[in-house]
Amino acid sequence: MKKLIGILALLVGFAFQSNAQGALKFKKEKHDFGTIAEGVQATYSFEFTNTGNAPVVISNVQPSCGCTTPDWTREPIMPGKMGKVTASYNSTGRPGNFSKTITVINNGSTSQIILMISGSVKPKA
Protein backbone atom coordinates (compact mmCIF):
# COMPACT_ATOMS: atom_id res chain seq x y z
CA MET A 1 0.00 0.00 0.00
CA LYS A 2 2.85 2.40 0.82
CA LYS A 3 4.39 1.69 -2.60
CA LEU A 4 1.09 2.47 -4.30
CA ILE A 5 0.79 5.79 -2.45
CA GLY A 6 4.41 6.61 -3.30
CA ILE A 7 3.85 5.88 -7.00
CA LEU A 8 0.69 7.99 -7.04
CA ALA A 9 2.54 10.86 -5.36
CA LEU A 10 5.27 10.65 -8.03
CA LEU A 11 2.72 10.67 -10.84
CA VAL A 12 0.93 13.70 -9.41
CA GLY A 13 4.29 15.47 -9.01
CA PHE A 14 5.18 14.80 -12.65
CA ALA A 15 1.75 16.01 -13.76
CA PHE A 16 2.21 19.34 -11.96
CA GLN A 17 5.75 19.71 -13.30
CA SER A 18 4.62 19.05 -16.88
CA ASN A 19 2.17 21.96 -16.55
CA ALA A 20 5.02 24.32 -15.68
CA GLN A 21 5.62 26.53 -18.69
CA GLY A 22 7.31 29.83 -19.28
CA ALA A 23 5.76 32.51 -21.49
CA LEU A 24 7.42 35.55 -23.03
CA LYS A 25 5.21 38.65 -23.17
CA PHE A 26 6.75 41.47 -25.23
CA LYS A 27 5.86 45.10 -24.46
CA LYS A 28 5.59 45.58 -28.21
CA GLU A 29 6.28 43.30 -31.16
CA LYS A 30 6.62 45.93 -33.91
CA HIS A 31 8.80 49.02 -34.12
CA ASP A 32 8.80 51.71 -36.81
CA PHE A 33 12.02 53.74 -36.99
CA GLY A 34 10.33 56.34 -39.18
CA THR A 35 12.73 58.01 -41.63
CA ILE A 36 16.44 57.47 -41.03
CA ALA A 37 19.46 58.68 -43.00
CA GLU A 38 21.33 56.20 -45.15
CA GLY A 39 24.38 54.89 -43.31
CA VAL A 40 22.73 54.93 -39.88
CA GLN A 41 22.79 51.82 -37.70
CA ALA A 42 19.18 51.88 -36.40
CA THR A 43 18.80 49.90 -33.14
CA TYR A 44 15.77 49.00 -31.05
CA SER A 45 15.42 46.79 -27.96
CA PHE A 46 12.23 44.75 -27.64
CA GLU A 47 11.64 44.24 -23.91
CA PHE A 48 9.73 41.26 -22.54
CA THR A 49 8.70 39.62 -19.27
CA ASN A 50 8.41 35.91 -18.50
CA THR A 51 4.75 35.75 -17.45
CA GLY A 52 4.79 31.96 -17.04
CA ASN A 53 5.71 29.76 -14.11
CA ALA A 54 8.96 28.21 -15.41
CA PRO A 55 12.26 29.60 -16.76
CA VAL A 56 12.45 30.44 -20.47
CA VAL A 57 15.61 30.04 -22.53
CA ILE A 58 15.96 31.78 -25.89
CA SER A 59 17.92 29.31 -28.01
CA ASN A 60 18.22 31.47 -31.13
CA VAL A 61 17.14 34.75 -32.70
CA GLN A 62 17.01 34.69 -36.50
CA PRO A 63 16.70 37.89 -38.59
CA SER A 64 15.07 37.74 -42.03
CA CYS A 65 18.22 39.07 -43.73
CA GLY A 66 21.89 39.84 -43.17
CA CYS A 67 21.21 43.58 -42.87
CA THR A 68 19.74 43.02 -39.38
CA THR A 69 21.88 41.92 -36.45
CA PRO A 70 20.21 40.51 -33.32
CA ASP A 71 21.35 40.31 -29.72
CA TRP A 72 19.34 38.87 -26.83
CA THR A 73 19.28 37.88 -23.17
CA ARG A 74 21.28 34.65 -23.13
CA GLU A 75 20.73 33.42 -19.57
CA PRO A 76 17.45 31.70 -18.53
CA ILE A 77 14.69 34.21 -17.83
CA MET A 78 13.03 33.29 -14.55
CA PRO A 79 9.27 33.77 -13.99
CA GLY A 80 8.48 37.46 -13.44
CA LYS A 81 11.88 38.60 -14.72
CA MET A 82 12.60 40.74 -17.78
CA GLY A 83 14.90 40.43 -20.76
CA LYS A 84 15.33 41.92 -24.20
CA VAL A 85 15.92 41.20 -27.86
CA THR A 86 17.84 43.96 -29.66
CA ALA A 87 17.69 44.38 -33.44
CA SER A 88 20.15 46.59 -35.32
CA TYR A 89 19.41 47.49 -38.94
CA ASN A 90 22.32 48.57 -41.15
CA SER A 91 20.92 51.13 -43.62
CA THR A 92 24.15 51.56 -45.62
CA GLY A 93 23.40 51.13 -49.33
CA ARG A 94 19.72 50.42 -48.67
CA PRO A 95 17.68 53.54 -49.55
CA GLY A 96 13.89 53.22 -49.54
CA ASN A 97 11.35 51.47 -47.34
CA PHE A 98 12.23 48.39 -45.30
CA SER A 99 10.33 45.83 -43.26
CA LYS A 100 12.28 43.06 -41.52
CA THR A 101 11.33 40.25 -39.18
CA ILE A 102 13.22 38.75 -36.26
CA THR A 103 12.18 35.25 -35.13
CA VAL A 104 12.71 34.50 -31.43
CA ILE A 105 13.05 30.74 -30.82
CA ASN A 106 12.51 29.70 -27.20
CA ASN A 107 11.23 26.93 -24.94
CA GLY A 108 8.18 28.90 -23.74
CA SER A 109 4.51 28.30 -24.45
CA THR A 110 4.90 30.06 -27.83
CA SER A 111 8.11 28.57 -29.19
CA GLN A 112 8.51 31.08 -32.05
CA ILE A 113 7.68 34.76 -31.72
CA ILE A 114 7.96 37.09 -34.71
CA LEU A 115 9.13 40.65 -34.08
CA MET A 116 9.16 43.31 -36.80
CA ILE A 117 11.13 46.46 -37.55
CA SER A 118 10.30 48.87 -40.36
CA GLY A 119 11.08 52.32 -41.62
CA SER A 120 12.33 54.34 -44.53
CA VAL A 121 15.94 55.10 -45.43
CA LYS A 122 16.51 58.56 -46.91
CA PRO A 123 19.20 58.31 -49.62
CA LYS A 124 22.41 60.27 -49.29
CA ALA A 125 22.25 63.57 -51.15
Image (cartoon, grey):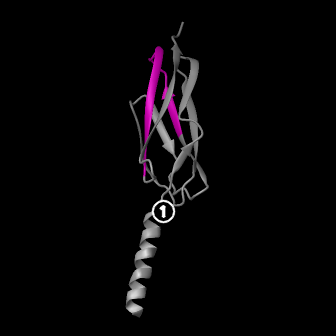
Q: Quadrant of the N terminus?
A: bottom left
Which residue is at 44% across, 81% downward?
A: 9
The residue closer to the viewer here, 10 or 92, is 10
> Predominant secondary structure in magenta?
strand
Furthest residue to the bottom? 1
Secondary structure beneath dot 1 equals loop
Q: Which residues are magenta?
A: 86-106
- Give the residue number, with chain letter if any, for mark 1: 20
The crowding category of the residue bearing disc 1, from other C-alpha atoms within 10 Å (few below 14, some 14 to 19, many at least 20), is some
Q: Looking at the image, how many numbered discs can be counted on the residues?
A: 1
Which residue is at 57% across, 23% downward?
A: 33
Which residue is at 44% across, 75% downward?
A: 12
**Is residue 20 part of the magenta span, yes or no?**
no
- Horizontal and vertical percent position of residue 26: 56, 42
Q: Amino acid at mark 1?
A: Ala
- Horizontal and vertical percent position of residue 71: 50, 42
Q: Quadrant of the C terminus?
A: top right
The residue closer to the viewer here, 109 or 102, is 109
Which residue is at 42% across, 79% downward?
A: 10
- Horizontal and vertical percent position of residue 59: 42, 51
Q: Is residue 24 above or below residue 33?
A: below
Q: Is residue 3 above or below residue 123?
A: below
**Is residue 93 part of the magenta span, yes or no?**
yes
Furthest residue to the front? 1
- Horizontal and vertical percent position of residue 46: 56, 38
Q: Is residue 60 above or below residue 80?
A: above
Q: Is residue 61 above or below residue 59?
A: above
